[in-house]
Amino acid sequence: MKILFTHGYFLSEDPKELQIMRPYVPLGILYISAFLEKNGYENEVFDSTFSTLDKLKEKILNTKPDAVAIYTNLMTKLNVLKIIKFIRSENSLINTKIILGGPEVRNYADNFLNYGADFIVIGEGEETTLELINVLSSHPELDSGSHEMLNQVQHDLSSIKGIAYLDNGKVITTAERPLIKDVNTLPFPNRQKIDFTPYLDGWKTHHGYSMMSVNTMRGCPYTCKWCSRAVYGGTYRRRSPQLVAQEMKHIKQTYHPDMIWFVDDVFTIHHKWLTEFAEEVKKQDAVIPYEIISRADRLNEEVIKTLKASGCFRVWVGAESGSQKIIDAMDRRVDVMQTRQMINLAKQHGLEAGTFIMLGYPGETKEDIKETIEHLVQSNPSQYTITVAYPIKGTELYNEVKNEFLDQRLEWETSTDRDIDFKRTHPKQYYQYAIQWVMNEVYLKTKNKNLLKIPYLKLKSLKYQLQMEMSK
């Protein structure tokens, strides 16, 4: 059986990311690819990041796979729809089954199926995809067999947990699949399926160093209302420190990256694990400089020292806001002052400390934004990012604001959840100008500047505030 994995993200279509140039490989499909191979199914991976939609179409036409499995998220959704439409329009691909997985599909399974997808893999993908491929490979006559045979196929499909499909025009959603209890049983991601040269070169050219990504855990037990849990739920399952260090050593010897990015939501969640990890990377000669994401309440001086000793050079401490009122509205369950303290403590111990800011959350006012500016000034992170809040279907934030959406005419086929706007304290444009105001104010108050430049920066600050007021 010919199986092709892809993800539909094309870097050339993303001007912002082309400028930032922090590309990472799609680890999710590489895990599933490796799992299928471990269980006897050879497969191909078409990494679209440095390719084009036309080349992906050409690949599908030339190989005529029995199944095309596509990772689908907010960023790739519209391209995934283009891929579905293409496959469905080609007579030579009439027998190709389209399988979708990823965070976007759980809450829009009906839409994707009615658009042309054959199967939706809901949640964690390895075991579900394997069982689905088992059924498809056992019944190549899926659409043309006898009535009795088709009944058997439907019976086999209905026994697979964690999928959705159409049966005579009706959407069938099977029982939820339990998450994999022991993630140590999973093989390493199938990195050999991908050409890492453009990734490593892209990083090196734009940043002076190369970087690769590693995953050590699945799920996040925290309750932030804006965060999607569509794939791994609110769990915490982690690979052993020994296996993670073994994977790092393999990466170090095979690809020679300068740095590692751990994609985990909260790397320091378990302090005993972290201590064992620090010991293992030294024991296995697997130390590579790395950066992580954490929370202030899972950091302290001892943890920061352990991170530093094991190779960590940058920690991102989630902040989201400098206003405790907004933090509490998000159900972040963290103290603003503690976040500030941990950012400063990390810097004191020689780590870079980044943070994330989100503006435009329900209830946010200019006073809250002023508190965020003060927070950034006092903590003075090495770098930070700012976004305007948007509701992802399936999250608590979405459920809270869904009756206050401002444009009910958005077409699912041509939009994503990022396009959804809702009634806020001020219009969305207000917060987009506020981003410029925040960045200008923080720069004005924290960076060493030519004194002649200060009046110019103050004028810019007044301009952004005027734009904010005019946008109300």
Image (cartoon, rainbow, N blue to C red):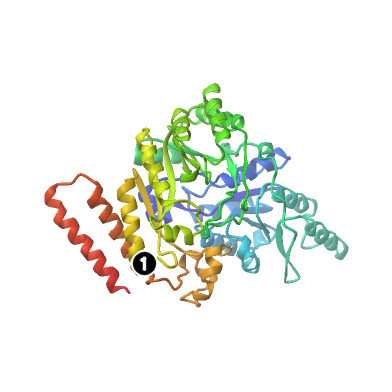
How packed mark 1 is, by other alpha carbons closer than 10 Å (few <14, some 14-19, many 20 or more), is some
Residue 40 position in % (x across, y down): 73, 40
249 over 405 or under it: above or below = above
| Camera-nearest residue between 363 and 9 | 363
| Camera-nearest residue between 439 and 419 | 439
Q: Quadrant of residue 435?
A: bottom left
Name the residue furthest left.
452
In percent of the image, x 60 and y 29: which residue is there? 242
Q: Is residue 129 left or right of residue 222?
A: right
| Camera-nearest residue between 427 and 52 | 427
Label 1: element kind: loop
- Is residue 189 visible from the viewing direction of this image? yes
Q: Is residue 442 left or right of residue 254?
A: left
| Number of numbered markers | 1
- Which quadrant is home to the C terminus? bottom left
196 over 284 or under it: above or below = below
Residue 265 position in % (x across, y down): 52, 46
Q: Is residue 2 left or right of residue 246?
A: right
Identify the residue position indicated by label 1 in the image: 365
Residue 427 position in % (x across, y down): 37, 72
- Is residue 195 visible from the viewing direction of this image? no
255 over 444 or under it: above or below = above
- Give the residue type that dot 1 points to: Thr
| Camera-nearest residue between 73 and 276 | 276
Residue 321 position in % (x across, y down): 40, 56
In percent of the image, x 65 and y 66: which residue is there? 113
